[in-house]
Amino acid sequence: MLTATAIAVDGLGFAAWLFLSSVGLTLIYGVMKILNIAHGGFYALGAYSSAWAIGVYTTTGSTVALTFLLIPLAALIAGAVAGLIVERGVLKFMYGRDEVLMVLVTYAIFLILEDVTKLIWGTQSYVAWQPAFYFGTVEIFDIPYTVYKFITIGTALVVGVSLLLVLNRTRVGKLLLVVIEDREISGALGINVNLFFTVTFVSGAILGALGGAITAPEISVSPGIGAEIVVLSFAVIVIGGMGSIGGAMIGALIVGFARAASVHLYPPAELFSIYLVMAAVLAVKPYGLFALAESRKI
Amino acid sequence: MTKHLDRTELGLLIALPFLILVAFILPKWIVNYVHVSMGTGLVALGVMIQMRAGLVSFGQGLYFCVGGYAAGLMAKFLGVTDFFVLLASGIVAALILSSLLGFLLRRYREIFYAMLTLAVSMILFGLLSSTEELGSTDGFNLPTPSYLGWHPEGETSRLTLYTLTCCVAIGCAIVLNRFLKGPTGYVNEAIRENELRVEYLGTSARQAVHITYVLAATVSAIGGVLWALPLGHVDPEMTNWTTSGQFVFVSILSGTGNIVAPMIGTFILEIVRVYAVEISPNTWQMILGTMMLLTIIFLPKGLWSLFGGKKKSGKSAGADAPTAGE
């Protein structure tokens, strides 16, 4: 019972973190057909700027409560600035090129972003634990959990639901779905496709940064976290079907619970269980659980 | 297979004695870089022959690691130190694993191929990082190799290993050159252009991809063994996706035009890295990324296209970068 509860709560916690970190990736792929390796760079930028901002702020000795405003703010600024520079500075010139080529381009950008974070924040670790313990802990079956974990889960839910609502219930969302359906026709209908691309990419970057910013208080922020999250979010969005937000939710839950289960039942399997799940899903459903089959073009 | 040697093969054979001679003339540190980059260069070659079919493997480190670990395990648990046995065990391990995985991977193309190769290599990464018997993330050491019962030491050992590495690496390059000029090599180019038409013409694209995958894996494993022996060490970082990314980087930079390009590219990169890391350690990846972007934008066929690319424009359809055009 104890283990089952632990797996359930930890699984949800992992899933929330994974969903926040990968939903931007799936959004960008869905709209722009770019598998954005640079996403890991946005995640790292978000984590660093959030940890740094919290660190600077807490040295002033003011109330910790305000850090909960700092986290989304840091993500917003870091994601928007980096996303705009990358999209306007590089990707804008590459639209319409081969999908594999775009993977290589974003890989190059990822490498650059890795060093940008090192140049700005150095190579030492940042620890910004204050927000994580501000609300204290709750006990479920004698196991203490930080309230922060539940805030993360709540944030993931809110982000997921509001994205789905925006896409399906608003005018902008419906226009975006038209752009996804057919770029050329929507351009001919008078939709500003390039603007949609820019907005989508920047939103994706902000979401990636938010994933990093929210996680920052729970981990030690150090070089390499970007490279780690890239492969994890690949696993998440591939399992669910790339470009599907609902798919990313399911993917995050599957990967989250797989990881929580292996952490509690057989710790050495923690890392490879995730990729094993991914490979297993792909072996049965080659394009993910929720992807629509595409016809082959001659 | 024709008996006639083409220009590249002739060049490689002529270069072999010079390459070996280099070990006796140039300073030791530079020879070490040549030595090590022959190992990693073979892995870049493995990435490159898949690119000819339009497939980008973001997990070639898997076989680099399998080769190194197969040799390492033989030495660690069976006490084998013979160079040829270690090399053979790397090859056999890669052959078995890639033949099996090939059945899964040959169904995928484009980004799915890239991601699935990445996922498979990360499975091994996770597995090795958590196996304490094999030193977890620290890896373990390899002994100095012996040669058919001969146990040289010190300088002799180093030079013997270097000479054999040169021979094996050049041999692999010639075999791969033959492969690219052979039937499957040409089918691969056709797959990149239009897979469906290849199948309408009665050839199995999946089979060609499978063969290419196994061949690339084998060459990468050989590279892994050749890389691990001079360093005397293996660790899971060999199969991390960032390592695989560097192999992709070299193939993009040097292009798919010629079999020699990735080998030279690896060496140059190795040397640039030494200086870049020394001068400014935190901008090394930035330099890599910028070089890669510039190459993709301005030289889509890689640096190799700068040399004599126009001479064979008539028949050089195969020299195109995998991802150019569209």
Image: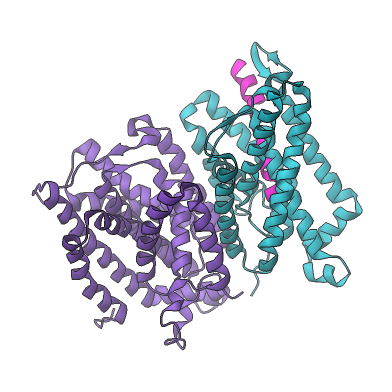
Chain colours: A cyan, B purple
Residue B6 sits above or below residue A19 on the image: below
**Left or right placement of residue A20 versus residue B156 in this view:** right
Q: Could you tell me residue A181's position as x and y percent?
A: 79, 63
Q: Residue furthest top?
A: A142
Residue A150 falls within the magenta-colored stretch: no
Front position in the image: B243 or B124? B243
Q: Could you tell me residue B219's position as x and y percent?
A: 33, 60
**Left or right placement of residue B30 versus residue B270 in this view:** left
Residue visible at 40% across and 49% down in the picture = B278
**Left or right placement of residue B35 versus residue A218 in this view:** left
**Left or right placement of residue B194 versus residue A142 in this view:** left
Residue A97 sits above or below residue A259 on the image: below
Residue visible at 52% across and 38% down in the picture = A123
Q: Could you tell me residue A250's position as x and y percent?
A: 69, 40
Q: Quadrant location of residue B30?
A: bottom left
Residue A8 falls within the magenta-colored stretch: yes
Residue B7: in sight, yes or no?
Answer: yes
Q: Could you tell me residue B227's position as x and y percent?
A: 30, 52
Front position in the image: A264 or B304? B304
Quadrant position of the C terminus of chain B in the picture: bottom right
Residue A257 sits above or below residue B235 on the image: above
The secondary structure that dominates the magenta segment is: helix
Q: How many marks?
A: 0
Q: Quadrant location of residue A89?
A: bottom right
Residue visible at 54% across and 27% down in the picture = A263
Residue A91 sits above or below residue A113 on the image: below
Residues in magenta? A1-26
Front position in the image: B326 or A244? B326
Residue visible at 25% across and 48% down in the picture = B229
